[in-house]
Amino acid sequence: MRLRRAGGRPGRATFVCAMLVALAACSNNPYSESDDELKVRYKTLPGPTKTLDPAVSYSSLEHQVTANVYETLLEYHYLKRPYTLMPGLSVAVPERQELERGRVAYRFDLREGMLFQNDPSFALGGEGRTTRTIVAADIAFELMRIADPAVTSPVIATFSKIEGLREFSERLQALRDETPEFAELRIDRQYEKAGGIPGVRLHGDYGLEIVLTEPYPQILYWFAMPFTTPVPWEAVVYYDGEDGRPFFKDHPVGCGPFVVSEFDKQSKIVMSRNENWYGVRHPEWKAPGTVYPSEGEAIDDELGRLDPAYVGRSLPLLDRVELRLEKENIPAFNKFLQGYYDASGIVRESFDKVVHEGALSPEMAARGMKLEKQVDPDLRYIGFNMNDPVIGTPAGDRGRKLRQAMSLAIDVVEYNRVFSNGRGVPAQSPIPPGIYGYAAEYRNPYRQPDLARAQALLEEAGYPGGIDSDTGKPLRLSFDLGDTSTAGRLRFRFFVDQWAKLGIDVEVAATTYNKFRQKVAEGAYQIFMWGWIADYPDPENFLFLLWGTMAQSTSGGPNTANFDHPEFNRLFEEMKGLDNGPERLAIIRRMRDLLEVERPWIELSHGESYALYHAWMKNVKPAGLSLPAAKYVDIDPVARARMRAEWNRPILWPAYAMALLATMIAVPGVLTFLRERQ
Amino acid sequence: MLAYIVRRTAYGFVVVLGVLLLLFALFFLYAEPVEMARRAVGEKAPPEVLEQWVVNHGYAKPTWWNAEAPGDTMIADHFRSMLTFDFGRSDSDDSPILGRIRAGMGPSLSLTLPLFAFGLVFGVGLSLFVAYFRETYIDRMGVVLCVLGMSLSVLLYIIGGQFLIGKLLRWFPISGFDPSPGVMMRFLALPVLVGLAEGLGGSIRFYRTVFIEETGRDYVRTARAKGCGDGRIMARHVLHNAMIPILTRVVVSIPFLFQGSLLLESFFGIPGLGSMMVDAINGNDFATLRAMVFIGALLFIGAQILTDIAYTLVDPRVRLS
């Protein structure tokens, strides 16, 4: 008893001391302090990756990894705008070769002596081997994977323009269905036995010729995306999810400037420098994608992106990139403000605190932050179902005037002010800024809010004041949306209210997204709102959304408006095969003029991203397209560590005050109670 | 008791079969496989790719009956995979679901176990304290604080906790997770504090009521008459006799510790099963959802049986038959 009591007091004292020490040692730093000296770029990942398989991955979230791990034959110039292709693994950007029967070919020549990253899977090709040389057959293998039905690549339709790709896909499936033994063969042998793709021709180890059945100049952009990266068959075979090995989709094996060195899908992905990258192994080549660029836009010079200290320097500049999963915006933004993320978007809740009259607020500027604005190559639009008898093509001139009137009623500047903190560039045509064919000076006469003209057009259409002159009944339309949230309904309410000013009664039919897609598939909709983000910087990537061949009702394609205009279709087919130039531009203008009058869409706006960067980040250039930007960016770790320490000193007095308060509340009560009991 | 356990387990099995049938009806009769494919492969995927995905994931099979190959139907696959605990692959990213559950259980438990333990200790301890000082300003202040605490939304606790403790006071990281034992507590401190603060009001109110009810009983008066001190009465007699309601609350919640916490894990970036559920809901990942709901049903049935058994341990008068 005595012993316990003797030990009890020091025990309590130790506990109290330990708590005080623990409090004094507490820190909000989520990273290891040993990394403070390293050039580690910390980025947020808004959700877990689904797949890092380059044949399948098609999201900008996953592209943050795949673009930096999988090197491509071509790549975009980091600073030049409009976006310009330059050689990557290929020695040059290939020229189009015309072949017989309207076919075209592109010949790539790979640089010799490039290696894949080190990986145990290469032991399948020879004992003790940890890497091997990249050959043209690795790209052919990846194209065969895109064609493979078991891979479910979302871009098979695009690559079906390669001669014989579709037939290869069917042959492969038939062989697997007919011969179970065939399906058991190693994947590269299956492809070999299925006969390969005739339109993918190898010339020696390093020559690759792609033959297309029709002119499609945009194919080159696809060779700047990870879909067409060289993939080693060894990795696909080895990473099969068996015996504790991960799946290939969770274990990238590439040849880019970085390798995935740590992969925890639910928590973080770490990319480290790839010592086998051709830029590291062969700096003497001075290949365009391996050194910091010396050219850019005029503004790049002004903003220090052409700093002589960087121009011509070998890449990558960082030691590591860490992507941390942050599903919620607010904690991620707060961690950015504490200096634990290097860059961030701006959460709506903090917009006014961060941005004042379009510029950085003084409070943020005092912390050395920088604000970058970027108009995204995307489009948000309201579409009309052109198959609808009231509002679509069957309604003829009446329907056209109704669409024109509805287009004139929408004030998108006000919409952006109310719902997007004023962010967004009002769209005049489907083509966004930065894409060939965009004309900054063009003003669509049906996209300038004008209620008087809209009312006149409505009257001409036979709906004076929103009343159908034929039946005497009010015109009732349905606006279908796949969002049942209050915020979503509010947004749609805005448009409905604007049309109500013309007397048009538009009912919002809000359903779940799945139900909405079902309605679209069944053609049971009148008006909808949708958007599109560019896959590559070409007008074809936007105008094909109105090409009759892509109509949702006939092909299940992305032309949800079911716009099928013979003249537009003819012009599109002519335009898509042409290289950029006056002839192509003239056709694009004619298509734009046609859309101006026909109004299958009400073009709303092109997105405008605001991004914040800390002062220690160098060479940041926002890009609307997903580019492999990690190799160009630099970090000043000393400045970062200093600012983090300054911004994150813990404030401990409230803890002591709370403890004191609790004691002050409890002690008199206890004393009083004890006294009363006595 | 063994007969009772066997009988309850058999009832439980029937309930599980019912749950499985309901799950199938809810998830796979209502859902459009093409839409699941679209969420998995991406908005821009052409129809043929979506159809291929549906075939590859077994959703193109007949739903109830296949005359050519009996047993090769969606419902047979559903029951087979659930009852053999071979949950298959996620609809969202093709990961093996069992592997994801195993991986997520650790982070979930690392959050829910301390939350449960501290919640129990503080809940019982503080309610004993306020019950001991009943009808004093401490009790009244406790009631006010508890009711206030129960009235606030859990989201307010989370965002407020992150703002106050993580951002303003800078004691702990606002969010994140690191499984290394040395630094894990740094990340768990804030979510545990927030979870504790959120749950404590209700717990104290519940346990206080139980304890006050017990303190009015005859045996307490008798103990006091015999000269037993108040502290001893509360700690030894009242606490012991209040075990049945406490156990009911505690044992039922133990199995659910494995399922984690949806909101806390999502907001604090803890890669546990709660966070996985949120992802599955957002991503139309019905394969993962049904596995989690099925496991939840099993845990619930298991918890009911465990509670019954626990009664016999704390109260010898209870007999299971």
Image (cartoon, coloured by chain):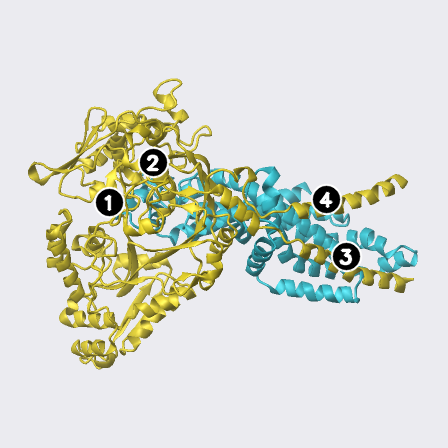
Mark 1 surroundings within 10 Å by alpha-carbon count, few (fewer than 14), some (14 through 19), many (20 or more): few
Q: Is residue A57 visible?
A: yes
Residue to which mark 4 is pinned: A18
First reached walking from the N terminus: tag 4 or tag 2:
4
Marks 4 and 2 sit apart, C-alpha to C-alpha, by 49 Å
- Which numbered tag is attached to residue B299? none
In front: mark 2 or mark 3?
A: 2
Left or right of residue A54: residue B268: right
Q: Amino acid at mark 4?
A: Ala
Disc 4 residue crowd, few under 14, some 14–19, many 20+, Cα 10 Å: few
Chain B display color:
cyan
Q: Quadrant of the C terminus of chain A?
A: bottom right
Would you identify the image quadrant in which residue A373 lies?
A: bottom left
- The residue shown at (38%, 17%) is A127
Q: Nearer the viewer, mark 1 or mark 3?
A: 1
Mark 4 belongs to chain: A
Q: Earlier in the sequence, mark 2 or mark 1?
A: 2
In this rendering, do the residues under marks 4 and 1 share a single chain?
yes
Q: Nearer the viewer, residue B97 or A232?
A: A232
Identify the image quadrant of residue A513. bottom left
Viewer-nearest of discs 3 and 4: 4
Q: Are marks 3 and 4 on the same chain?
A: no
Q: Are marks 4 and 2 in contact (CB under 8 Å)?
A: no
Determine which residue is flagged by label 2.
A70
According to the picture, the residue beneath numbered tag 3 turns out to be: B128
Q: Which residue sits at x=89%, y=54%?
A: B228
Q: Which chain is yellow?
A: A
Marks 2/1: CA distance? 19 Å
